[in-house]
Image (cartoon, rainbow, N blue to C red):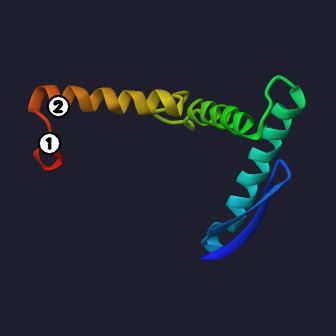
Amino acid sequence: MERVDISLLGRDYSLACAPSEKENLLAAVSHVDRRMQRIQESGRVSGNERIAVMTAIQVAIELLSVRAPDGPLGNVALGDFKRRIEDMHQLIDQVVGPDPTTR
């Protein structure tokens, strides 16, 4: 693992990550920091903790609305896909019963 120093809203943090993941981590930090700065600059939310929570919600919404690439699942949002799989699991459990290894 490699130590990576980052900054979010002017606060410094040290994170550990695999060297192969460093580039993605830094890109994610940059994305989150930009989002946090926009929320802070809007003036509607104050306090770093509240800004972090609002940013997390926005990033989650962004992730769950990502569309699948072309193909049989094209134009299906990731969140919809996840909900469909959960619905299928519930239907399977109703028909065959719950998995005994998860008890």
Q: Is residue 70 above or below residue 100?
A: above
Question: Is residue 54 shown left or right of residue 92?
Answer: right
Q: Residues within 10 Å of mark 1 (few under 14, many from 20)?
A: few
Q: Quadrant of the N terminus?
A: bottom right
Q: x and y percent of residue 23 in the render? A: 72, 64
**Residue at label 2?**
93
| SS at badge 2 | helix
Choose the circle earlier in sequence order: 1 or 2. Answer: 2
Q: Residue furthest front?
A: 47
Contact between marks 1 and 2 (CB within 8 A): the answer is yes
| SS at badge 1 | loop
Front residue (pair 93, 3): 3
**Residue at label 1?**
99
Q: Residue furthest top?
A: 44
Q: Is residue 41 above or below residue 32?
A: above
Amino acid carrying label 2: it is Asp
Question: Is residue 23 shown left or right of residue 70?
Answer: right
Picture quadrant where residue 32 is located = top right
Residue drawn at (44%, 31%) of the image: 81
Amino acid carrying label 1: it is Asp
Q: x and y percent of residue 14 in the render? A: 71, 66
Question: Is residue 3 shown left or right of residue 95?
Answer: right
